[in-house]
Amino acid sequence: MSSLEISSSCFNRETKLPLFPPLVEDSAFEPSRKDIDEVEEKSKDVINFTAEKLSVDEVSQLVMSPLCGAVSLFVGTTRNNFEGKKVISLEYEAYLPMAKNEVKKICSDIRQKWPVKHIAVFHRLGLVPVSEASIIIAVSSAHRAASLEAVSYAIDTLKAKVPIWKKEIYEESSSWKGNKECFWDSLLKHSLLCYTRGTKGGKRKQDKWICRMKGYLKWN
Amino acid sequence: MSSLEISSSCFNRETKLPLFPPLVEDSAFEPSRKDIDEVEEKSKDVINFTAEKLSVDEVSQLVMSPLCGAVSLFVGTTRNNFEGKKVISLEYEAYLPMAKNEVKKICSDIRQKWPVKHIAVFHRLGLVPVSEASIIIAVSSAHRAASLEAVSYAIDTLKAKVPIWKKEIYEESSSWKGNKECFWDSLLKHSLLCYTRGTKGGKRKQDKWICRMKGYLKWN
């Protein structure tokens, strides 16, 4: 499955969720000898937010390369429990322009830190039932240390920086939450708190946080 | 796909390589609330050495659990180059009783170190063409840190301790090698060196190494 195929599938499938095509970027990764492969293989970052069910085989195949001896993957799945409550499913929403931008930056950071070949980050949106994957991250590299470390870094950073919210649907209730590790969630919670307080001081605090968020959007 | 199905497939498929059934072990992993699942799911270690082509989807499905939010995987693939030479394929052989024992110990070590749910270690034997997987390790856990760290530990320890040899098949030549990180390889190389020297001192050294190996086989 090529990145081109993914791109067309994102646009053609019927879904109510906003999707965007995968990003394909080149990097400075070079094979040890140019004549190892007759056609030199360009490095790529494939980023996809989709309402479709995710496939581990599909994402791992995207990063496979004859130049690489290692592929590391992380698959995040819906657990049937959270803080002692029985979870039925999770529902994900993302602020897509920002989420795309943050994941692109994570890919760029990885390429600065490790000599990796291909990176794929797939996030499912909408309802994700128990045991199904909400995220798959796959990274390939010539040797194993680079891809193993890059995958850990990718999921830790994604949880901390990418604006994705999830609704936990329990047996008898539900609630929308940001990732507790994500600074976007803290910003929004603080703004909301100030707003609902409705005081003069609260309004000033809210404006301060919104200003910070706008600054972040502009400069990052 | 259940562990039982794997077990039968190992015995029924036609192959000239010696195969053994996957090991299924229970561990002390406990769900946070017994009533989260009506049927409590037992932890398992699935170990398989096979001549069949490996499937990332199949191995990842083996470790998926409704109790887990994370699955981490490592896939080792055949690179098309080694030290500047063009590799056509790799051919793997293992001393199976010892290899099985060593992988069982790695699983046991992992369960001492991290709260993981299921572990699967699949190693392909025989010829593995470029870009195909020779090994897939998959670990599931409630939270991501445990499975990420366990997979890194598993592949590092497997490379260092499990007696698996590979034949690198180049365009115009080939050579059998142990993993350079594996102490078994050093032992065998040293024994062979002493043997081929054919001196009295060489024989004593060889006996010493063989004695050490026998001791290891007996006590570990």
Image (cartoon, coloured by chain):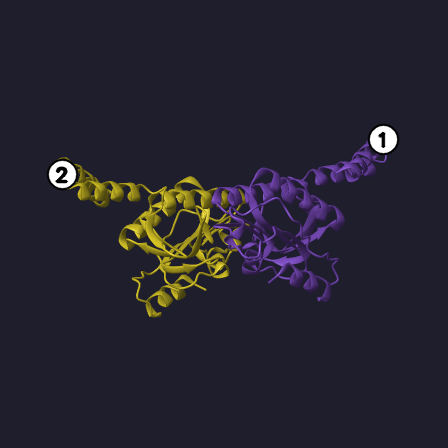
Chain colours: A purple, B yellow
Relative image position of residue B38 (x, y in whole percent): 50, 58
> Which one is in front, B47 or B142?
B47
Q: Chain of mark 1?
A: A
Local SS, label 2:
loop
- At horizontal 27% and vertical 53% (from top left) the residue drawn is B97
Q: Residue at the top extreme?
A: A201
Relative image position of residue B62 (x, y in whole percent): 46, 58
Label 2 amino acid? Answer: Thr
Label 1 amino acid? Answer: Arg
**Whether residue B73 can be seen here:** no
Mark 1 surroundings: few (<14), some (14-19) or many (≥20) residues within 10 A: some
Relative image position of residue B6 (x, y in whole percent): 39, 64
Quadrant of the rendered image containing residue A131: bottom right
Q: Which mark is residue B68?
A: none
Q: Residue at the right extreme?
A: A200
- At horizontal 67% and vertical 55% (from top left) the residue drawn is A48
> Which one is in front, A44 or A171?
A44
Local SS, label 1:
helix
> Which one is in front, A72 or A118?
A118
Image quadrant occupied by the C terminus of chain B: top left
Disc 1 with disc 2 on a shared chain: no
- Describe residue B169's horizontal placement relative to residue B101 as left or right: right
**Relative to A72, does residue A183 appear above or below in the rendering?**
above
Q: What residue sits right under mark 2 in the picture? A: B199
Q: CA distance from mark 1 to mark 2?
A: 88 Å
Relative image position of residue B146 (x, y in whole percent): 49, 43
> Which one is in front, A11 or B3?
A11
Q: Nearer the viewer, mark 1 or mark 2?
A: 2
Q: What residue sits right under mark 1 in the picture? A: A204
